[in-house]
Image (tube, grey):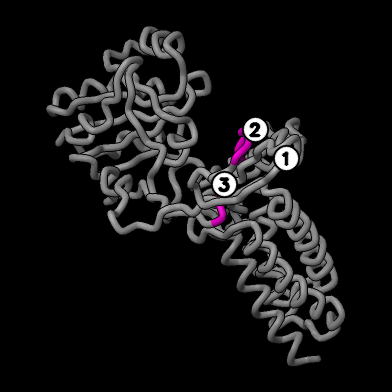
Amino acid sequence: MKVLVALSRIFVGVLFIISGFIKLNDPLGFSYKLQEYFGYDVLNIPFLEPYALGISILVVVFEVVLGVFLLIGYKPKFTVWSLLLMILFFTFLTFYSAYFDKVKDCGCFGDALKLTPWESFTKDIVLLAFILVLFFGVKYITPIFGKLPTTVLALLSFILSLWFGYHVLEHLPVIDFRAYKIGANITEGMSVPEDAPKPVQEYTWTFNVNGEEKVIKTNGSYPSVEGDFIGVDTKVIQEGYQPPIYDFSIESTDEDLTESFLNEARLIVVISYSLEKIEKNGALKLRSLQDLAMKKGYKIIGLTASGEDAKQRIKDTYNLDFDFYLCDEKALKTVVRSNPGVLELNKGTIKQKVHWNDIELLEL
């Protein structure tokens, strides 16, 4: 039992720290995932959506801290009970998502490692087994240092986790796991190789044959049936290749300008997924950014999911001369974790990306 507890302690502690740190590196991204869980079509608790960011920070800080507590042996009973309750909740959540096909990616490891709901559920079952070993062998979890050093380490883990979460919110994730990281080319990210696997679909055809319903399944071809067609349902039984970037676009009200702008050699893109929610202090910096970019020979545009009224109001309020184009809100939230955020593009390649707090750090 001592050996099992020691191995479980290391495995669970390290995994909780890694999983928590990845999400703590991008708490805003995890909050978007929580909003998805809170939505009407998943858990149906939309009143929690406004608090998603606060909840995400508390959850991931607690996750990291519990991992540290377990490794150093701080308050074993509290730590093991907390781990057990947390894993039971996550196991329910991933099972619910998988069984009812509600959320395609659980967000357990942020954008660093994508897991399907069933993979996440399996992972949680394995973790639950290890945590149960810790629960029944809690008497073997002893501090690896003296009382004072253990308490200091426990407190430091909490303070540093909170500080790190605050730091990345006020700037950007320290490690960018997304397809829009600096150095990535957006055009290449949207391309699909010629030999890429295609999705496999199953077609369920329903016919009326001599007054009775007849159901036939095919891979897409229309079945040869002497009867009246009633309807057809399709189901994806094997996903095809999906490029890393699939929902990015730059559109005006009447045309798609994505290719044109992604061929620009010196382009500054101001990202605001919602102009209604734009940070005022960030918006105030856009005029000076605009003037400097134009002076240095850059073209500057904005990207938003907001409507024409919001675009014009922001331009008038902050005296902006550049145009805002349309893009999907979810895509913009993925591009940069800031509202507004700024990108420098060179023929579709992301050269620089900054939070509005760091606009002055752009090197133009």
Tell which circle, 3 or 1, labels the residue nearer the N-terminal end. Answer: 3
Numbered mark located on residue 358 in the image? none
Q: Does 37 sit above or below residue 342? A: below
Q: Which of pointers 2 and 3 lies earlier in the amino acid sequence?
A: 3
| In the displayed structure image, the side of residue 95 where residue 316 appears, left or right | left
In this picture, is 161 found above or below 348? below
Residue holding disc 2 = 230
Numbered tag placed on residue 203 in the rendering: 3
| Range covered by the magenta-colored residues | 226-237
Disc 2 on helix, strand or loop? strand
Q: Position of residue 228 (x, y in %)?
A: 63, 32
- Residue 143 in sight in this render: yes
Give yes or no for contact between labels 2 and 3 (Cβ–Cβ under 8 Å). Answer: no
Q: Residue at x 25, y 37 (%)?
A: 344
* Residue 154 image point, x, y percent: 68, 67
Q: In the rendered structure, are the residues bearing label 1 and label 2 in contact, judged by CB atoms less than 8 Å apart?
A: yes
| Mark in front: 2 vs 3 | 2
Cα separation, mark 2 vs mark 3, equals 13 Å
Name the chief secondary structure element in magenta. strand
User: Residue at label 1?
Assistant: 213
